[in-house]
Image (cartoon, rainbow, N blue to C red):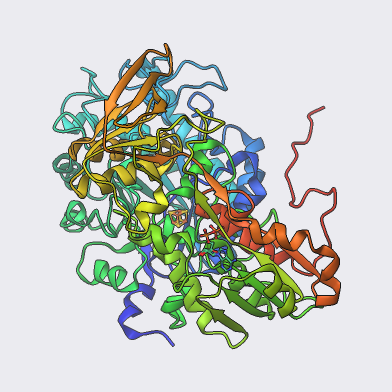
């Protein structure tokens, strides 16, 4: 039973010649699978269709071989041969009455062409602007090139139509699409009729849309995706110019798709961006054009979504990450189950699939990108096998997800947690600066567990091997987590770091449980994900004088993959944290640390009152090893299996733990994989 407050989200609305069944619009998003894993990517989109989205888009599709962004794995539509694999995606999108959209990208100044070896083409001759500072420059397009590119867009539109798509999104946002490169004075320094005035800079967009309308506009809708502000000041395509552009070309596309800044700006993590962070930038734009407007803002709250529409800010609610964390948001709202929404936590782990060319992962939705590979459905799971009960030891992300999924299968589940509160690491990490939304990992699962009669939760229960053997559960899942090391072992030091016990040493666990350093603090980050930067922020907030020392060339190096590295550096700099890059710690003495340059080994000293070691973690696998050593007693105790999962098996980010928990529950009572590959894989057919 839907709450009438949300009726507005389910009103159909026309986009050009088509009608979307509701206002839920999955904007284009990458996933790491792309052209390498077309069936996996197609099944993932199909899940959004089942979940009730009205419009579903592909990731960016490289529409011509003269512009590609290797090493990033997106879709390709370079020739007719590419049609079947993207047609599979279009078919999956349309299974439940959604409109299927394809995003066509010509990457221009953003495409280094590492694979095709073509000379990049852009409005003006400038170095390629990517994440990787490739030593490649683009050639400025001449009139013949512009004519060719217009034709290539038409060819791509015709192929998109043959593949079965309903909508085409022309990519001109995030600095990634050629339309922005023409629109922005920063990347368009031409002196001909395509450069100079905004009228001239818009010419290319107008011409392409007109060409495409002639070719496919009778049946397909054309949308244009631009950033609300290029975020590089007046020289860039600013919010004021975006408004002028939309006013001047009010009826150009069938829908305006409004993204923000660079990809980092648009997909800001919850640590730096609130829900609906773009509201001020988008306000008023809808009045400039008769065309509908979609905008994003990591929307997970149905009330915020409804407000965006009733207040006249947006016509469609654009979602990428929220639709990954919960592909069933529309259906849950429609069925009056808003409390079942698995809210995105804004951690940006989903983006690391693309950034590392791995397979997409989601912290909240461990089935993401496993819909085809492993046949995992985010809402459905096979009923239980022959056995009946399972004891989960530990209630971190791994234990809670194992419990949730096993309970859904119908097992009797008991969760024993040593502490008084459930949630494991997220119960503590959610208290750190900027990480409160991460608590949703525990909140969602605890709420689900509390609804079920077949689940017992035992707080304050630190179990021993004797107790586990006494209880006699058929399956025991050890998800006891890990603890931060205090001996400095990580990458620089593979054996303990020399330390004078006179200097107080802290670990992240100390800080998270309220034992805080004072005075001059050195934070040694040899972990390189978020923790070092977050603790530097915490210590600075507490009034400490903080120096962050890291052997890496960047603060919180790995967060480049979650698009927050620059924001972290900016924040630490603004808090007055001294940042020492390319620097290790060779020894800890009574009143100082001895540093070493990672290139020359030149030594230095930093006087300090305390050191925080953010190095690595040690699995808390004592219970597992004790049970393992008593395997002979399992049968008498009625135990059929004992497994260790999550950080207790090997420490990793939270998404690894929820995946491990989910996998555990799925595989309970299933035959062992043995030597077989535990997922399906797409293998390229060889050409003759
Ligand atoms: P993961 O990320 O793998 O889920 P966490 O560290 O977040 O791991 O959670 C592990 C949880 O297990 C912690 O809350 C910890 O208190 C709990 N735990 C550890 N040992 C025991 C034990 N012997 N009995 C019950 N709970 C335990
Ligand atoms: Fe949201 Fe994190 Fe999942 Fe991405 S990985 S969808 S940011 S919860």
> Does residue 19 appear in the picture of this structure?
no
The spot of residue 344 in percent (x, y) is 42, 61
The spot of residue 568 in percent (x, y) is 30, 40
User: 469 or 23, which lies in front?
Assistant: 469
Q: Residue at x 83, y 59 (%)?
A: 672
The quarter of the picture where the N terminus appears is bottom left
The quarter of the picture where the C terminus appears is top right
Relative to 303, residue 487 above or below:
above
> Does residue 286 appear in the picture of this structure?
yes
Q: Residue at x 26, y 68 (%)?
A: 309
Relative to 487, residue 9 above or below:
below
The spot of residue 38 in percent (x, y) is 64, 46
Residue 232 occupies quadrant = top left
Quadrant in which ligand 1 is drawn:
bottom right
Left or right: 412, with 239 as reference point:
right
Left or right: 482, with 12 as reference point:
right
The spot of residue 645 in percent (x, y) is 65, 58
Left or right: 369, with 627 as reference point:
left
């Amino acid at each position: 039973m839907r709450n009438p407050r949300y009726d507005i989200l389910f009103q159909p609305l026309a986009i050009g010649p088509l009608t979307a069944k509701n206002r839920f619009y999955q904007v284009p998003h990458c996933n790491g699978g792309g052209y390498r894993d077309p069936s996996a990517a197609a099944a993932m989109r199909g899940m959004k269709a089942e979940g009730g989205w009205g419009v579903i888009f592909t990731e960016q599709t490289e529409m011509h071989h003269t512009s590609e962004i290797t090493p990033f794995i997106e879709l390709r539509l370079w020739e007719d041969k590419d049609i079947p694999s993207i047609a599979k995606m279009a078919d999956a999108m349309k299974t439940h009455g959604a409109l299927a959209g394809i995003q066509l990208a010509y990457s221009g100044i953003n495409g280094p062409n590492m694979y095709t070896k073509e000379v990049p083409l852009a409005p003006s001759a400038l170095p390629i602007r990517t994440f990787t500072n490739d030593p490649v420059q683009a050639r400025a397009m001449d009139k013949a090139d512009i004519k060719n590119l217009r034709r290539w867009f038409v060819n791509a539109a015709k192929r998109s139509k043959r593949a079965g798509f309903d909508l085409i999104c022309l990519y001109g946002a995030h600095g990634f699409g050629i339309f922005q490169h023409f629109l922005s004075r920063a990347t368009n320094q031409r002196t001909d009729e395509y450069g100079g005035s905004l009228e001239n800079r818009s010419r290319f967009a107008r011409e392409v849309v007109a060409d495409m309308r002639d070719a496919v506009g009778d049946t397909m809708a054309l949308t244009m995706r631009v950033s609300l502000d290029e975020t590089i000041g007046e020289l860039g395509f600013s919010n004021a110019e975006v408004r002028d552009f939309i006013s001047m070309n009010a009826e150009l596309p069938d829908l305006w798709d409004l993204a923000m800044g660079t990809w980092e700006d648009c997909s800001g993590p919850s640590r730096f961006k609130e829900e609906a962070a773009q509201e001020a930038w988008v306000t008023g734009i809808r009045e400039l054009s008769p065309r509908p407007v979609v905008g994003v803002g990591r929307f997970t709250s149905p009330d915020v979504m409804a407000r965006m529409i009733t207040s006249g800010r947006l016509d469609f609610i654009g979602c990428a990450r929220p639709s990954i964390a919960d592909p069933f948001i529309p259906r849950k709202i429609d069925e009056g189950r808003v409390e079942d929404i698995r809210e995105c936590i804004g951690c940006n782990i989903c983006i690391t699939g693309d950034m590392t060319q791995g397979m997409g992962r989601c912290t909240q939705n461990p089935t993401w990108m496993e819909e085809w590979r492993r046949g995992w459905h985010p809402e459905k799971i096979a009923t239980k096998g022959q056995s009946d009960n399972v004891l989960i030891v530990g209630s971190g992300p791994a234990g809670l997800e194992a419990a949730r999924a096993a309970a859904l299968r119908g097992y009797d589940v008991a969760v024993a947690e040593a502490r008084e509160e459930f949630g494991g690491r997220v119960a503590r990490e959610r208290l750190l600066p900027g990480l409160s939304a991460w608590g949703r990992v525990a909140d969602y699962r605890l709420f689900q567990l509390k609804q079920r009669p077949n689940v017992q939760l035992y707080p304050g229960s630190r179990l021993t091997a004797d107790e586990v053997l006494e209880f006699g559960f058929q399956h025991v899942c050890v998800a006891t987590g890990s603890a931060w090391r205090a001996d400095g072992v990580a990458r620089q030091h593979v054996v303990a770091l020399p330390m004078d016990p006179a200097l107080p040493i802290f670990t992240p666990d100390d800080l998270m449980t309220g034992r805080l350093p004072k005075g001059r603090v050195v934070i040694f980050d040899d972990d390189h994900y978020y923790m070092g930067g977050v603790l530097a922020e915490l210590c600075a907030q507490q009034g400490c004088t903080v120096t962050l020392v890291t052997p890496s060339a960047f603060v919180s190096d790995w967060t480049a993959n979650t698009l927050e590295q620059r924001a972290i550096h900016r924040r630490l700099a603004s808090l007055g944290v001294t940042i020492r890059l390319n620097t290790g710690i060779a020894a800890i003495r009574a009143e100082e640390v001895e540093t070493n340059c990672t290139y020359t080994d030149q030594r230095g000293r930093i006087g300090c009152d305390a050191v925080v070691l953010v190095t690595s973690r040690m699995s808390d696998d004592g219970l597992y090893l004790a049970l393992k050593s008593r395997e002979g007693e399992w049968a008498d105790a009625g135990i059929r299996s004992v497994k260790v999962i999550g950080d207790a098996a090997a420490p990793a980010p939270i998404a690894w733990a929820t995946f491990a928990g989910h996998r555990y529950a799925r595989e309970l009572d299933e035959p062992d994989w043995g030597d077989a590959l535990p997922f399906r894989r797409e293998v390229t057919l060889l050409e003759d």
